[in-house]
Amino acid sequence: MVPNPQRTMSTISEDIVLEEVDHILVSGTGNLDFSVSGENSYYTWWGAEDSDWDVSDVDRVENVEEDRIILYPEAEFFTCEIEADGEEENTGPVRCHCG
Protein backbone atom coordinates (compact mmCIF):
# COMPACT_ATOMS: atom_id res chain seq x y z
CA MET A 1 0.00 0.00 0.00
CA VAL A 2 1.30 3.44 -0.89
CA PRO A 3 0.51 6.24 1.58
CA ASN A 4 -2.06 8.66 0.23
CA PRO A 5 -0.91 12.28 0.58
CA GLN A 6 -4.52 13.49 0.05
CA ARG A 7 -5.69 12.04 3.37
CA THR A 8 -6.88 14.35 6.11
CA MET A 9 -5.51 14.26 9.66
CA SER A 10 -7.30 13.60 12.96
CA THR A 11 -5.29 14.67 16.03
CA ILE A 12 -4.96 12.19 18.89
CA SER A 13 -5.40 14.17 22.12
CA GLU A 14 -6.38 11.43 24.59
CA ASP A 15 -5.52 7.77 25.24
CA ILE A 16 -6.68 5.46 22.46
CA VAL A 17 -6.11 1.98 21.04
CA LEU A 18 -6.00 1.82 17.24
CA GLU A 19 -6.53 -1.53 15.57
CA GLU A 20 -5.97 -2.49 11.93
CA VAL A 21 -3.15 0.03 11.44
CA ASP A 22 -1.70 -0.81 8.02
CA HIS A 23 1.27 1.58 8.14
CA ILE A 24 2.79 4.28 10.34
CA LEU A 25 4.51 7.46 9.16
CA VAL A 26 7.29 8.59 11.53
CA SER A 27 8.88 12.04 11.45
CA GLY A 28 12.23 13.05 12.85
CA THR A 29 10.49 15.45 15.22
CA GLY A 30 8.59 12.70 17.08
CA ASN A 31 5.24 12.89 15.28
CA LEU A 32 3.47 9.67 14.31
CA ASP A 33 0.71 9.31 11.70
CA PHE A 34 -1.32 6.09 11.87
CA SER A 35 -3.15 4.75 8.81
CA VAL A 36 -6.15 2.63 9.82
CA SER A 37 -7.48 0.24 7.17
CA GLY A 38 -10.69 1.43 5.53
CA GLU A 39 -10.45 5.02 6.80
CA ASN A 40 -9.65 8.11 4.73
CA SER A 41 -7.70 10.03 7.36
CA TYR A 42 -4.54 9.56 9.36
CA TYR A 43 -4.62 9.67 13.14
CA THR A 44 -1.80 12.05 14.11
CA TRP A 45 0.00 11.89 17.46
CA TRP A 46 2.03 15.07 18.01
CA GLY A 47 4.96 13.84 20.09
CA ALA A 48 7.97 15.57 21.54
CA GLU A 49 11.35 14.84 19.97
CA ASP A 50 12.37 12.61 22.90
CA SER A 51 8.96 10.91 23.30
CA ASP A 52 8.61 7.26 24.31
CA TRP A 53 7.37 5.18 21.40
CA ASP A 54 8.15 1.70 20.15
CA VAL A 55 6.97 -0.22 17.08
CA SER A 56 7.72 -3.95 17.00
CA ASP A 57 6.96 -6.62 14.38
CA VAL A 58 8.04 -4.35 11.51
CA ASP A 59 8.27 -6.09 8.14
CA ARG A 60 9.81 -3.26 6.15
CA VAL A 61 10.86 0.37 6.38
CA GLU A 62 10.67 2.80 3.45
CA ASN A 63 12.18 6.27 2.94
CA VAL A 64 14.97 5.62 5.44
CA GLU A 65 16.99 8.50 3.97
CA GLU A 66 14.12 10.99 4.23
CA ASP A 67 12.84 13.10 7.14
CA ARG A 68 9.83 10.76 7.36
CA ILE A 69 9.90 6.99 7.30
CA ILE A 70 7.09 4.51 6.71
CA LEU A 71 6.78 1.36 8.84
CA TYR A 72 4.83 -1.65 7.57
CA PRO A 73 3.73 -4.59 9.80
CA GLU A 74 4.95 -8.20 9.55
CA ALA A 75 1.34 -9.39 9.73
CA GLU A 76 -1.63 -7.69 8.10
CA PHE A 77 -1.96 -4.94 10.75
CA PHE A 78 -0.47 -3.28 13.82
CA THR A 79 -2.40 -2.68 17.02
CA CYS A 80 -1.26 0.57 18.68
CA GLU A 81 -1.79 1.58 22.30
CA ILE A 82 -1.34 5.34 22.48
CA GLU A 83 -1.19 7.69 25.47
CA ALA A 84 -1.79 11.40 24.89
CA ASP A 85 -2.11 14.29 27.36
CA GLY A 86 -3.21 16.89 24.81
CA GLU A 87 -2.87 17.90 21.20
CA GLU A 88 0.89 18.62 21.19
CA GLU A 89 4.19 17.70 22.85
CA ASN A 90 3.01 14.26 24.00
CA THR A 91 5.61 12.01 25.60
CA GLY A 92 3.84 8.65 25.36
CA PRO A 93 4.21 5.87 25.68
CA VAL A 94 3.08 4.56 22.31
CA ARG A 95 3.34 0.80 21.74
CA CYS A 96 2.57 -0.82 18.40
CA HIS A 97 2.76 -4.53 17.61
CA CYS A 98 1.15 -7.17 15.41
CA GLY A 99 -1.51 -9.41 16.84
Image (spheres, helix red, strand yellow):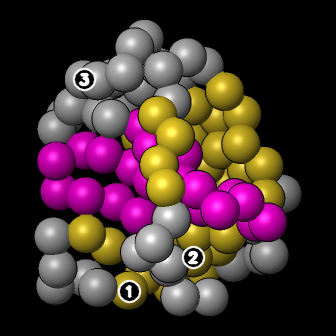
How far across and how far down the image is residue 34, in percent?
54, 54
> Which residue is the site of mark 3?
89
Residue at (41% x, 64% y) in the render? 25
> Which residue is the site of mark 1?
62
Please give the label number shown on residue 72: 2
Tell me the chief SS of the magenta region.
strand
Please give the label number shown on residue 17: none
Q: CA distance from mark 3 to mark 2?
A: 25 Å
Q: Amino acid at mark 3?
A: Glu
Occupied quadrant, residue 95: top right
Residue at (65% x, 34% y) in the render? 81
Residue 97 appears left or right of 77:
left
Sequence order check, earlier mark of 1 and 2: 1
Which quadrant is home to the N terminus?
A: bottom right
Sequence order check, earlier mark of 3 and 2: 2
Q: Amino acid at mark 1?
A: Glu
Residue 17 appears left or right of 44:
right
How far across and how far down the image is residue 8, in percent?
49, 55
CB within 8 Å, label 1 to label 2: yes
Q: Amino acid at mark 2?
A: Tyr
